Image (cartoon, helix red, strand yellow):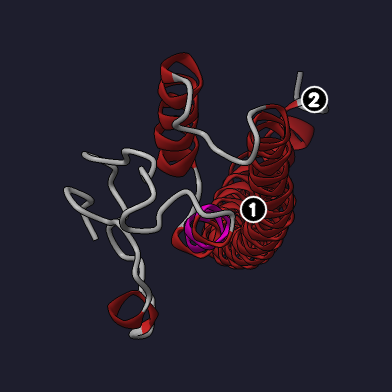
Amino acid sequence: MSAIAPTTIEANSPRSQTRWYRKLTIHEILQLFSSVLLPLMLTVFTIIITIRQEQVAREQRLQDMNNSAQQRAEDRQMAQQQRDHDLKIAGDQRDQDDLIAQKQRELLEKQRQYELEIESTRYDKEHEKHLDTLLLTYINEIGTLLLNNNGSLTANSHVASFARAKTLATTRLLDPTRNIQIIEFLYESGQLTNGRNPLDLSKANFNSIRFQGRHGTWPMHLSSIWI
């Protein structure tokens, strides 16, 4: 019994206990760092990283928004420029079309005027030809009557009536120049001479005829004639 007691007392001595607690304290401190501080540092590091990532993401979103806004502004500007360009092209095209249409209208009007002038000229020529035909026909028919009636249109009442009707009808269709030729023809053939049973041309309309003073010197029977 006496041999075991000293060993037990030595093991429970204050110095032994101090060393054991010192070792335990260091171990616990290491465990504290490993089990508490390290996770805390990891947590803080994670929070810092998360905050930084959120900051980067926010900056990226802002940058994307700015880029999008700038792109939209550029797109609107380009679209407006394109619309202005299209409007200018359309306006220039309309002006060109209006100019071409105006030139076409002017050309058509000139063509129409030219055709009207040609038609008028053709009509005038045909009308003149028609009047010449009427005059020639009258002279031929009256000449034939004169030849067949001994140079007198009034010796026979039927011939006189025909000659009067023919003369009145023809002179209504002819112009003043040709009507003068009819009067001169009748006068020179002795059908309008005073005192020789002249052809009755009363009510004949010889308006606008100018004899240039000749009917004042000719012994011509022009009573009841409108001149």
- Dividing the picture into quadrants, the one containing residue 150 is top right
Q: Reading the chain from its start, which is encountered first: label 2 or label 1?
A: 2
Q: At 61% across and 56% down in the image, what residue appears?
A: 64
The reply to whether the magenta stretch includes residue 181 is: yes
Q: At 65% across and 53% down in the image, what residue appears?
A: 124
Q: How many marks?
A: 2
Label 2 CA crowd tier, 10 Å (few <14, some 14–19, many 20+): few
Q: Secondary structure at mark 1?
A: helix
Residue 120 - label: 1
Residue 212 vertical position relative to residue 79 in the rendered view, above or below: below
In front: mark 2 or mark 1? Answer: 1
Alpha carbons under labels 2 and 1: distance apart: 164 Å
Going by the picture, which residue comes out furthest to the top? 158
Image coordinates of residue 155 in percent, x first then y, are 47, 28
Give the camera-side residue of 50 and 182.
182
Image coordinates of residue 40 in percent, x first then y, are 57, 47
**Magenta-drawn segment:** 179-186
Residue 89 - label: none
Q: Is residue 113 left or right of residue 196?
A: right
Give the camera-side residue of 193 and 210.
193
Q: Are marks 2 and 1 in contact (CB under 8 Å)?
A: no
Which residue is label 2 attached to?
A: 4
Q: Identify the amino acid type marked 1.
A: Ser
Q: Identify the amino acid type marked 2.
A: Ile
